[in-house]
Amino acid sequence: MDSITTGPAHKAPADSRVTLAHIMSEHDTNLYGTIHGGVIMKLIDDAAAAAAGRHADGPAVTVSVDRMSFLAPVHAGDLLSAHASVEYAGRTSMDVGVRVTAERWNASGPTVEVVTAHLTFVAIDEDRSPRPVPELRPVTPEDHQRYLRAVRRRSLRTEQRTAAG
């Protein structure tokens, strides 16, 4: 048997945490001299997929992006770090929160939060069908807060689907 079907029954959010970092270059800029939003979105999706895959003990695919908020511009030379972790796990799906920070290497100053995002992933088996994931067990007070916010986002998504018919 493989690890996809024999993993643990539950995991803590810390078990799935991932940080991906990338130095932004001139090739990533738009006409305004800032980094393309799509470049940042790819980093977010990659980090979220890694966190979901860690939680699911195997592949997971992006189902939706609930929200992505760009808070500050990103420039060439900035070191972007995407910090992702699973905040809620259903039967086959996972809600992943991502926080992106920028270290301004071209200017002195503190690390800045530049983007936040929430994405939903579904774990898949070798036939690309949804498969069960471990239960998420929040540990810290921050884990519990993120879990409760994820439950509210899931509830809103369900209401919106129902209202859309």
Image (cartoon, rainbow, N blue to C red):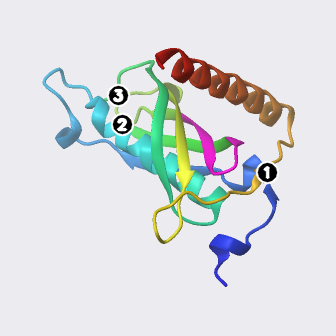
Which element is circle 3 on? loop
CA–CA distance between discs 2 and 1?
27 Å
Q: Considering only order in the chain, which callout, 1 or 2, is on the residue closer to the N terminus?
A: 1
**Is residue 94 positioned above or below 108 on the image?**
below
Percent x, y for residue 57? 63, 65
- Amino acid at the residue labelled 3: Val
Query: To which residue does mark 2 refer?
Result: 40
**In which quadrant is the N terminus drawn?**
bottom right
Q: Is residue 70 left or right of residue 156?
A: left
Q: Considering only order in the chain, which callout, 1 or 3, is on the residue closer to the N terminus?
A: 1
Residue at (50% x, 51% y) in the render: 49
Percent x, y for residue 147? 75, 33
Residue at (49% x, 42% y) in the render: 81
Residue at (74% x, 47% y) in the render: 13
- Amino acid at the residue labelled 2: Ile
* Segment tinted magenta in the rendering: 88-99
Evaluate if marks 3 and 2 touch, with contact meaning CB atoms under 8 Å apart: yes
**Is residue 135 positioned above or below 25 on the image?**
below
CA–CA distance between discs 3 and 2?
9 Å
Whether 80 is among the magenta residues is no
Query: In this view, which residue lies farthest toward the front?
Result: 165
CA–CA distance between discs 3 and 1?
32 Å
State whether the magenta stretch is mostly helix, strand or loop: strand
Residue at (68% x, 72% y) in the render: 5
Which element is circle 2 on? helix
* In front of the other: 48 or 114: 48
Percent x, y for residue 130? 55, 57
Query: To which residue does mark 1 refer?
Result: 12
* In front of the other: 149 or 26: 149
- Amino acid at the residue labelled 1: Ala
Query: To which residue does mark 3 refer?
Result: 74
